[in-house]
Image (cartoon, grey):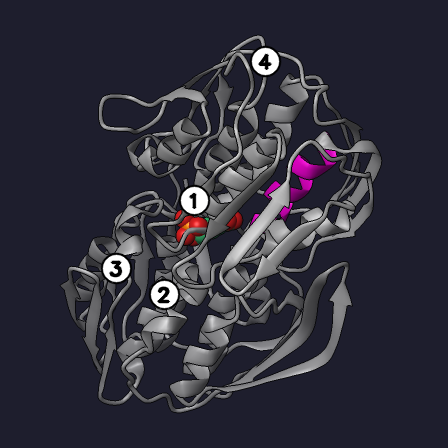
C-alpha cells in the first residue's frame, strides 16, 4: 500500500447533513452469517472498506458466491453451515482483528485445514484469547510461539464440543468467536461477559432465524441449527460518526447532522461520554434497521469540560477513545480515562500512539498503564505519526479544527480500512485537507 500523508489546515468549522459508511462490525458479521445461511441474502449499507472486503474475499475463496449488486450492496448465496470448501491458499485478513477472530470460530469447526494471516499490525495482535477457548472446545488451532498470527487450524476430527466460557476480558470478538464455533457443537455453548460488549452477533443471528438466549451477562445458543437467508440493512457506523461528533463539538459555529447511524446501546458510550463533557448532541428520527436501532445524530458546537470518564462506559466506547482524547484536549480542566488497557492491543498501542501524537502537537497528555490524563491545552499543530492505525490518523485530522498551525498527519492511507471517503466528506463539511502520496 502506498504511503499517503495528509496536511490539515488549522481552524475552521463544520456544517451540513451527511451520511457515513456502514458499520464495520455489522459488515463483517453480515458476510459470515449470510455465507453460512441457507438461501440468498441481500445486504445493503455494507462497508466497502478493506477490512470487511477481506472477510468477503475469504468466503469467496471457500466457495461462497458473493456478488456486488450496487455501490454498497451485496448478494450472498449461502452454502449452509456445512457447505464451505477448503481454501486453496492462506486466507489473508489484512488489518482486521474482527475478521480474524470471528473467522477462527468458524474455521476451527470445519473438516478441513486452513491458515489465517494478516498485515504487520494484525500479526502483532494477541490471539491467545481465542486460541484458549477454542482449544477447550476441542479445536486444533495454533498461533506462533507468542500466540500471535498466523493461525494454523486443522480439522478437529470428531468436531468441536460445547463449553461454557467465562470471558476474562470484555471482548465482543472473543464472545462471537466462541458462539460461532458453538454453532457446530452438539448442545448448548454459553459465555458470560465481565461487562456488556457489543451484541451485534446475537442480534444478527436472530435476524438469520437462529435462536440466541441472552440472560443477564450470559449468552447461549444450541448448536447444529440452521441459519436462514435474510435481507439486511446495515446502519451507518457510529465509530466513524464519532469523528464528526467531536469535530462539530470542538469547532466554532458548527452544526452537523449525520443520518442513519447505528445507536445500539452497546455502542453509544461515545455519546454518553461527550454529553457528560457538555456536548450538544440530539438523536432524531429514531427507528430500526433490521434488529439494530438507528437515528440521525445532530451535533452543535459546545464548550466542553473535562471529566473522569466512568469506567463502565469504556467498553462501550473503546474504538472512540482516541477521538475522545482530542475532545479532552480542548475541554476545560482535566480529563482522566482509566480501565482502558485494551487500547494497548488494538490496531496499534493506542495509548502510546495518542500520547505521543498529542504531545507532538502541544497537548499536555500523560499516558498511564490503562488510560490517559489530559489537561486543557492550546493545540499548536505539527507532525504526528499514526503508527499505521486508521483511528489515530482520523483523530489527529480532527484536532486541526482547534490548532494554531496546520497538522501534518503521516500515513493516512489506512483510513480506508474503516472510513473510505473520509477526507472528501470532511472537506464537504468545511475542513481543508490535502493528501499527498
Ligand atoms: C469489535 C469488537 C471490539 C472493537 C473492534 C470490533 C467487533 O473489539 O474494538 O473494533 O466487531 O466485535 P474487542 O471485542 O476485542 O473489544
Say which label, 3 or 4, has the lower sequence index.
4
**Residue 436 screen position, x and y as percent:** 41, 45
User: Residue drawn 23% across and 59% down?
Assistant: 357
Q: Mark 4 points at which residue?
A: 111
User: Residue drawn 23% across and 28% down?
Assistant: 146
Residue 1 appears left or right of 43? left
**Could you tell me how far apart the alpha carbons at marks 1 and 3 are, in whole angstroms?**
33 Å
Mark 2 closeness class: few <14, some 14–19, many ≥20 residues within 10 Å:
many
- The residue furthest front is 187
**Could you tell me how far apart the alpha carbons at marks 1 and 2 are, in whole angstroms?**
28 Å
- The prevailing secondary structure element of the residues shown in magenta is helix
Say which label, 1 or 4, has the lower sequence index.
4
**Could you tell me how far apart the alpha carbons at marks 1 and 4 are, in whole angstroms?**
23 Å
Q: Is mark 1 on a helix, strand or loop?
A: strand
Mark 1 or 3: in front is: 1
Q: Mark 1 points at which residue?
A: 165
Q: Is mark 4 on a helix, strand or loop?
A: loop
Numbered mark located on residue 321 in the image: 2
Amino acid at each position: 500500500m502506498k504511503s499517503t500523508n495528509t496536511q490539515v489546515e488549522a481552524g475552521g468549522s463544520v456544517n451540513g447533513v451527511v451520511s457515513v459508511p456502514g458499520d464495520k462490525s455489522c459488515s463483517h458479521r453480515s458476510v459470515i452469517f449470510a455465507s453460512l445461511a441457507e438461501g440468498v441474502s441481500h445486504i445493503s449499507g455494507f462497508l466497502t472498506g478493506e477490512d470487511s472486503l477481506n472477510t468477503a474475499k475469504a468466503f469467496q475463496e471457500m466457495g461462497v458466491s458473493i456478488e456486488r449488486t450496487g455501490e454498497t450492496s451485496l448478494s450472498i448465496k449461502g452454502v449452509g453451515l456445512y457447505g464451505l470448501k477448503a481454501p486453496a491458499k492462506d486466507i489473508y485478513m489484512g488489518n482486521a482483528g474482527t475478521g480474524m477472530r470471528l473467522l477462527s470460530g468458524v474455521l476451527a469447526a470445519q473438516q478441513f485445514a486452513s491458515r489465517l494471516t494478516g498485515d504487520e499490525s494484525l500479526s502483532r495482535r494477541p490471539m491467545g484469547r481465542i486460541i484458549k477457548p477454542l482449544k477447550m472446545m476441542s479445536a486444533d488451532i495454533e498461533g506462533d510461539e507468542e500466540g500471535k498470527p498466523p493461525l494454523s487450524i486443522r480439522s478437529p476430527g470428531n468436531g468441536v464440543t460445547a463449553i461454557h466460557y467465562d470471558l476474562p476480558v470484555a471482548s465482543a470478538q472473543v464472545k462471537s468467536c466462541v458462539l460461532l464455533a458453538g454453532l457446530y457443537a452438539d448442545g448448548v455453548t454459553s459465555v458470560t461477559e465481565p461487562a456488556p460488549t457489543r451484541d451485534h452477533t446475537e442480534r444478527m443471528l436472530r435476524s438469520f432465524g437462529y435462536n440466541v438466549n441472552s440472560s443477564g451477562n450470559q449468552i447461549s445458543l444450541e448448536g447444529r441449527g440452521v441459519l436462514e437467508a435474510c435481507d439486511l440493512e446495515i446502519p451507518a457506523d457510529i465509530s466513524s460518526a464519532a469523528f464528526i461528533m467531536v469535530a462539530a463539538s470542538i469547532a466554532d459555529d458548527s452544526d452537523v447532522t449525520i443520518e442513519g447511524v447505528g445507536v445500539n446501546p452497546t455502542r453509544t458510550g461515545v455519546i454518553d461520554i461527550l454529553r457528560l463533557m457538555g456536548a450538544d448532541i440530539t438523536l432524531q428520527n429514531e427507528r430500526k434497521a433490521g434488529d439494530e436501532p438507528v437515528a440521525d445524530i445532530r451535533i452543535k458546537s459546545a464548550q466542553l469540560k473535562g471529566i473522569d470518564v466512568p469506567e463502565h462506559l469504556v467498553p462501550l466506547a473503546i474504538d472512540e477513545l482516541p477521538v475522545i482524547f482530542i475532545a479532552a484536549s480542548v475541554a476545560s480542566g482535566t480529563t482522566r480515562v482509566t480501565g482502558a488497557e485494551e487500547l494497548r492491543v488494538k490496531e496499534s498501542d493506542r495509548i502510546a500512539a495518542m500520547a505521543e501524537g498529542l504531545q507532538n502537537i502541544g497537548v499536555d497528555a500523560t499516558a498511564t498503564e490503562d488510560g490517559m490524563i489530559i489537561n486543557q491545552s492550546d493545540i499548536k499543530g505539527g507532525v504526528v505519526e499514526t503508527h499505521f492505525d486508521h483511528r489515530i490518523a482520523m483523530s489527529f485530522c480532527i484536532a486541526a479544527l482547534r490548532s494554531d498551525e496546520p497538522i501534518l498527519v503521516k500515513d493516512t492511507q489506512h483510513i480506508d480500512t474503516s472510513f473510505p471517503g473520509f477526507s472528501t466528506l470532511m472537506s464537504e463539511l468545511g475542513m481543508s485537507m490535502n493528501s499527498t502520496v
